[in-house]
Image: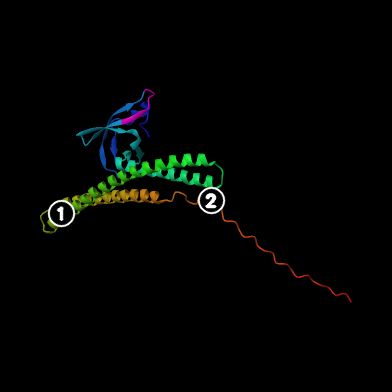
Amino acid sequence: MVCESIEKITECINKPVVDPYGRRLGYIVGYYSNSDGRVYALEINFNDSDYKEVSIERFTTSVEGIVLVPEHEFNATQIENRLRIVKARIASLEDLYSKKEIPVHVYEQFKKRLEEELAKLKGAAREVKEALRKRIHEVEDLIAEVEKTMGILKTSYLSGEIPEKPYLDALGSMKKTLEILTREKDSLKKHIDTIESLEALPLTPAIGMKQPEKTPTTQQTQPMQVVLVE
């Protein structure tokens, strides 16, 4: 991240900020740092009317510039990563225990700790999924509104009320908006599917488990050849 230290912050001040789908959100107008010089948050001017402090963790970079990840998507990614780690640790613990490589008291202690962490994660995952679904409904409403406006615009053009150039310009703009909204909706659904898939993973997947022993093949006794000597 280019804005993570005071030495680099001059590269970011007054730079535009976009969301992951390329929509302009506002500008970086300030920063907050610790005594060690590391920046922990940026102040963003949203749409020339709102100012907000945003954690540096939610910023990244792309070919389009400095990207601010929406809070619900950032939280979704965090939950996904933590679920992967906890589930993998539980699987590894079960694998070690099945091989008798750790004592019972260590196994029970670690398992209890991981199960408690997993329970907390599931509660947080519910809240994250609710936020994602709420945004999906908002996006669907926006898509419906844009499609309605496109229908009205086409009707007005075909009836001769507006000339071709402004019609095509407006239509092209709305088509681009629809494409962006559709991408966002797909991304939100993917986050929900990923979280639910991780939640559904068994606690003891077959990671490093012992392979079933092969039944030894019984060798057939070859018949003894008898040579007759005359």
Give, as a three-letter code, the residue at label 2. Met
| Residue 59, quarter of the rendered image | top left
Q: In this rendering, does residue 70 appear at all?
A: no
Here the colouring is rainbow
Tell me if mark 2 has few (under 14), some (14-19) or many (20+) residues whose alpha carbon lies within 10 angstroms of its own.
some
Mark 2 vs 1, N-terminal side? 1
Question: Foreground mark, 2 or 1?
Answer: 2
Q: Is residue 47 inside the magenta stretch?
A: no
> Which amino acid, by three-letter code, is at mark 1?
Leu
Task: Say which residue appears at 30% left-offset and 31% top-offset.
Answer: 42
Tag on residue 153?
A: 1
- Tell me if I can see residue 142 in this picture: yes
Q: Position of residue 156 (x, y in %)?
A: 12, 56
Residue 209, disc: 2
Report the quarter where the C terminus lies: bottom right
* Above or below for 15 versus 173: above
Residue depicted at 24% across the width and 50% down the height: 137
| Whole-number angstrom distance, CA of label 2 to CA of label 1 | 63 Å
Q: Which residues are magenta?
A: 35-41
Residue closer to the observer: 223 or 153? 223
